[in-house]
Image: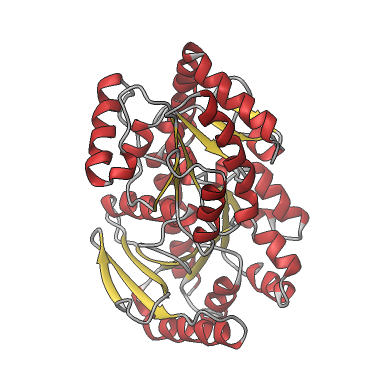
């Protein structure tokens, strides 16, 4: 057991559940079992949000964040910097969930301090640094972090090519817990539980169900999926698509669903704290416009034994082998996506083979225990180095 005191800084956390937030929440629980005393520092995205809550035994502190950007963002950064300076003696390591404004503020608040700062590179952080108004300044500050964690060798190489020190970069993929074995009984039980909680999720025992977990912040990127499902619903009457997630363009996405006449075939139940029953109830997972390695939810779907349909790109080829754990299709192409879904629905034995391969890969390469161990080893080494250099 360890006595490490860890602060995790992230702009979004429970009840907002997106890629990074899911990964962090799972990691925090695993570290908690190892004795790590974790605290979350995040934003309060509404005036009525409590400033202090306990989520799964972990204290969460929320700093008010105005909805506007510009100077309002600067005010938020000053608030988290002030909070950290007031509480820095309570922590050994600070883990920041991006290479953006929050990282800039935290490193600045802890310059010449004995608290180690670790950053986790997000999927689009490098592009953000290139495009944002103060991105170059943020990049220079991020290069001062004690360590940067990435999901893959490809991500590490991208940082090195951008000028980051390779010695400070550590590849630690997201980890996911071991899921229940798939079976007909488990699928039926999960479907019944979900139907009892939300009538929109009611489905027959053998009804084909696909699930897509995504943030609803880009309506145009989801139009091909909706158009695809109109074709699938005509071929397999009663087949369901569950679009899991939330976001600022939720109403826009729903309007597209209604325009396609799919309000009885495509359902948008919002976000879920726990996705175990969702994945156990589904037959396949669709991951469009996403990198599988950067999405803990998609890795959890694999651990649950779902075959994955994902965009055909280098990042996804690093994780999935086309035809083994799932199918890779050209991005935004309706005919290719339709063919992939149809193939899995028409050939249950192929879907079963991919299910087993998907589960095996996730449990071997993305073990939660291994990810937590590697995080803890890095944090403890950095904390020890800081103490020895004092």
Front-most of 347 and 389? Answer: 347
Does 310 sit above or below residue 156? above
- Residue 217: name its quadrant: bottom right
Front-most of 114 and 7? Answer: 7
Q: Position of residue 198 (x, y in %)?
A: 28, 46
In the displayed image of the protein, which residue is found farthest to the top? 349
Q: How many marks?
A: 0
Q: Is residue 321 visible?
A: no
Q: Residue at x 40, y 45 (%)?
A: 373
Q: Residue at x 65, y 74 (%)?
A: 141
Asked if residue 140 lies left or right of residue 66, the reply is: right
Q: Position of residue 35 (x, y in %)?
A: 27, 55
- Residue 99: name its quadrant: bottom right
Q: Position of residue 109 (x, y in %)?
A: 52, 82
- Residue 134: name its quadrant: bottom right
Does 149 sit above or below residue 51? above
Does 24 sit above or below residue 326? below
Asked if residue 272 lies left or right of residue 135, the reply is: left
Asked if residue 68 lies left or right of residue 199, the reply is: right
Q: Specify how the rendered protein is coloured.
A: secondary structure
């Amino acid at each position: 057991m360890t006595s490490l005191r860890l602060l995790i800084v992230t702009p979004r956390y429970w009840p907002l559940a997106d890629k990074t937030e899911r990964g962090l929440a799972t990691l925090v629980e695993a570290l908690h079992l190892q004795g790590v005393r974790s605290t979350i520092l995040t934003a309060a995205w509404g005036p009525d949000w409590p400033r202090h809550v306990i989520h799964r035994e972990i204290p969460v502190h929320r700093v008010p964040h105005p909805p506007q950007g510009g100077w309002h963002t600067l005010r938020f950064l000053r608030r988290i910097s002030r909070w950290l300076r007031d509480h820095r003696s309570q922590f050994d390591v600070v883990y920041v969930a991006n290479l953006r404004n929050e990282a800039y503020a935290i490193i600045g608040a802890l310059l010449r301090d004995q608290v180690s700062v670790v950053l986790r590179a997000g999927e689009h952080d490098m592009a953000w640094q290139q495009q944002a108004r103060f991105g170059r300044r943020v990049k220079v500050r991020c290069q001062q972090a004690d360590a940067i964690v990435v999901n893959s060798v490809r991500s590490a190489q991208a940082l090195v090519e951008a000028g980051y020190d390779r010695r400070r970069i550590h590849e630690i993929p997201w980890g996911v817990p071991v899921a229940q074995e798939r079976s007909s009984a488990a699928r039926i039980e999960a479907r019944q539980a979900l139907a009892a909680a939300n009538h929109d999720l009611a489905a027959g025992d053998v009804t084909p169900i696909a699930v897509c977990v995504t943030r609803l912040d880009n309506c145009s990127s989801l139009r091909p999926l909706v158009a695809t499902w109109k074709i699938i619903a005509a071929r397999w009457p009663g087949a369901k698509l569950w679009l899991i997630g939330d976001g600022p363009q939720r109403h826009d996405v729903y309007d597209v669903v209604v325009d396609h006449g799919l309000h009885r075939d495509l359902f948008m139940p919002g976000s879920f704290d726990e996705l175990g029953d969702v994945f156990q109830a589904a037959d396949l997972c669709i991951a469009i416009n996403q990198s599988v390695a950067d999405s803990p939810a998609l890795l959890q779907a694999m651990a649950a034994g779902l075959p994955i349909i994902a965009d055909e790109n280098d990042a996804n080829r690093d994780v999935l082998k086309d035809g083994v754990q799932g199918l890779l299709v050209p991005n935004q192409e309706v005919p290719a996506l339709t063919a992939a879904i149809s193939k899995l629905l028409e050939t249950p034995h192929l879907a079963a083979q991919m299910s087993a391969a998907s589960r095996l890969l996730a449990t071997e390469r993305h073990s939660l225990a291994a990810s937590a161990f590697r995080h803890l080893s890095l944090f403890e080494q950095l904390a020890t180095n800081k103490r020895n250099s004092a």
